Amino acid sequence: MSMLSLSTIDEAYTRISHVVHLTPLVRNRTLAEMADSDLALKAENLQRTGSFKIRGAFNKTAVVHEAGGTGVVTGSSGNHGAATAWAARYFHLQAHIVVPKNASPQKVQAARSYGANIEFVGTTSQERLERAQQISQDLGLSFVAPFDDPDVMAGQGTIGLEILEQLPEVELVVVPVGGGGLIAGIATAIKGKRPDVRVIGVEPLGAPKAYLSRQQGRLIVLDSTDTIADGLKTLSLGEKTYPVIERLVDDIVQVNDQEIHNAMSLLLTRQKMLAEPSGAATLAYVLRRPSQIRHRKTVAVVSGGNIDPSSLCHLLDSSTP
Ligand SMILES: Cc1ncc(COP(=O)(O)O)c(C=O)c1O
């Protein structure tokens, strides 16, 4: 395991670029006007397995494979589990995925379809990560952490490299925050190459672990969370992601579930783009027209598009054209 740095992100890109899609930067005039910003959306909802998670999961699983490992195990609310299962199948490794009892059926089905063993445990990230670590010890499988691992963070950071290639004049990048692997990786890539570009983290009002950690100057662990953004429900940032976020992320902001819902609905009706709640959180923030994004060349990372058919029906029912 190596430390997270610009060079480990470059190495990750070499390892994963033959497998991950170079996702487009999507521009939509209506949304840009609504946000009063020169806005582009980094469409990781179009990524293989439906979210950015394949980048980190594939990088870590490739490292395990190179080291002669026989299998991988993880605990995940869904996207990371599916991505890890996909990567394990690629390398013909065994995969064991621990998911919460209330996991999104579509995400669980994806992991199962890639050949992983699925185990349902508890409802919190803590419960499933503890179980995954136990299995790792008992069965000798390598643990693929959802965010708190430098190889995983390096994989996610490849999005930062792509954004700088695709839009060299970018001024601001907006990223959703769950456990912080995505933003730690992206911020390391962006600040390593272009320290002048601002990086802003967005989290739900009902899961304010990064916001409170920043406010109180220490790693805060929440007792519970309440939000429709299932990928951002983590109880705390990681011990490895937190210091990177503190050092490199310019601002942490919050959005409520209604704003997330509206952003999903707008993405669908105006751009024909399907985002899951965690993926739409960044647009939700941008649409508030905060002064720090106005008239700026802004990239909002739409991190995933995996949504259950029933939630999609609900979204369509409640969408206004
Ligand atoms: C779609 C989506 N966006 C964002 C995140 C947050 O990523 P991280 O935990 O690395 O902050 C997740 C995590 O599961 C996710 O599934």
Image (tube, rainbow, N blue to C red):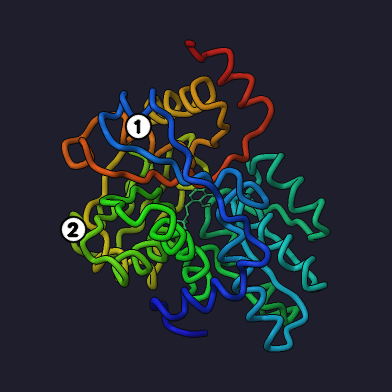
Q: Quadrant of residue 119?
A: bottom right
**Residue that badge 2 annotates:** 216
Residue 129: horizontal and vertical position, in percent?
57, 64
1 up-or-down from 128: above or below: below
Q: Nearer the viewer, residue 135 or 246?
A: 246
Q: What separation in Å lies between label 1 and label 2 (alpha carbons)?
A: 21 Å
Q: Nearer the viewer, residue 112 or 188?
A: 188
Residue shown at 38%/52% (left/top)? 167
Residue 207 tag number: none
Q: How many marks?
A: 2
**Residue that badge 1 annotates:** 256
Residue shown at 58%/17% (left/top)? 316
Which amino acid, by three-letter code, is at mark 2? Answer: Gln
Element class at badge 2:
helix
Which amino acid, by three-letter code, is at mark 1? Answer: Asn
Residue 174: horizontal and vertical position, in percent?
34, 48
Residue shown at 83%/59% (left/top)? 115
Is residue 179 in view from this perspective? no
154 up-or-down from 230: above or below: below
